[in-house]
Amino acid sequence: MYIEQLDKQRLLITLAKDELSLFTKNDLDADSDTSQKLFAGFLSLAAVKAGISLLNKRLTVELLPGIDSFFLIITITPQRKLSAGRLSHLCVSFQSACDLIGCAERLKLLKSPGIVTSSLYRHEHTYYLVLTASAQRLQTFLPLFTEYGRVKQISKRQMMRIDEFADNIMRYDALDQFC
């Protein structure tokens, strides 16, 4: 394994095919726990070698096959904070109902006052929880939301698109119904 820092925000990890032959196809499946641990190990090692902290960073990983090796290009960017406007709209997407329920259970324990509206949608196999509250209030729940799903601050227009294309399961008070 060869690790090179391309610039301030990008790392290149080169893996020879013979290094990857130590793993089974299931080990390298993107959804398996083994592959996630494997790539987390690669990222940790690369960060230590390059002297980069991955704490509170957003990572984009690209896998590129070569003739006799594979290349991982990792782009590291700071995690965005929510804007400080009056009310912000946040969309948390969950890949499974279990993740959604787990997040709702934790919110129940934290008592989540201050969230103005919360609507739940489903499109294909993904659940979307759309929250409206002050940016400061949403910021306090951000670590919890990122633990269970993907978080994105959305505009009113994007919120309308979700409402138009996804099936609405609970409107306006989804968190109250869950909690």
Image (cartoon, rainbow, N blue to C red):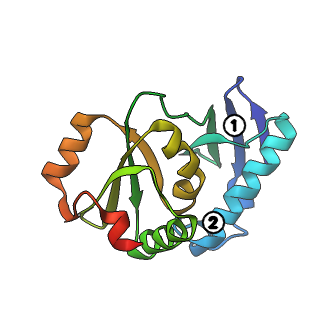
User: Could you say which quadrant of the image residue 26 lies in?
Assistant: bottom right
- Does residue 109 appear left or right of residue 117 in this picture? right
Mark number displayed over residue 72:
none
Quarter of the figure with the C terminus: bottom left
Front-most of 90 and 75?
A: 90
The correct choice, above or below, for 118 with respect to 53 in the image is below
At which x and y percent is residue 170?
23, 65
At which x and y percent is residue 52?
80, 35
Mark number displayed over residue 35:
2
Q: Amino acid at mark 2?
A: Ser
The correct choice, above or below, for 163 with respect to 135 in the image is below
- Does residue 54 appear left or right of residue 148 in this picture? right
Q: Which comes before the other along the chain, label 1 or label 2?
A: 1
Q: Secondary structure at mark 1?
A: strand
- Residue density around tag 1, few if under 14, some if 14–19, many if 20 or more, within 10 Å: some
Cβ–Cβ under 8 Å for marks 1 and 2: no
Hey, which residue is sitting farthest front in the picture?
113
Q: Secondary structure at mark 2?
A: helix
Residue pictured at 72% horizontal, 23% vertical: 8
Residue pictured at 57% horizontal, 58% vertical: 144
Residue pictured at 82% horizontal, 49% vertical: 45
Hey, which residue is sitting farthest left in the picture?
164
At which x and y percent is residue 51?
85, 35
Q: Amino acid at mark 1?
A: Leu
Badge 1 is on which residue?
12
Front-most of 97 and 29?
A: 97
Q: CA distance from mark 1 to mark 2?
A: 18 Å
At which x and y percent is residue 56?
68, 42
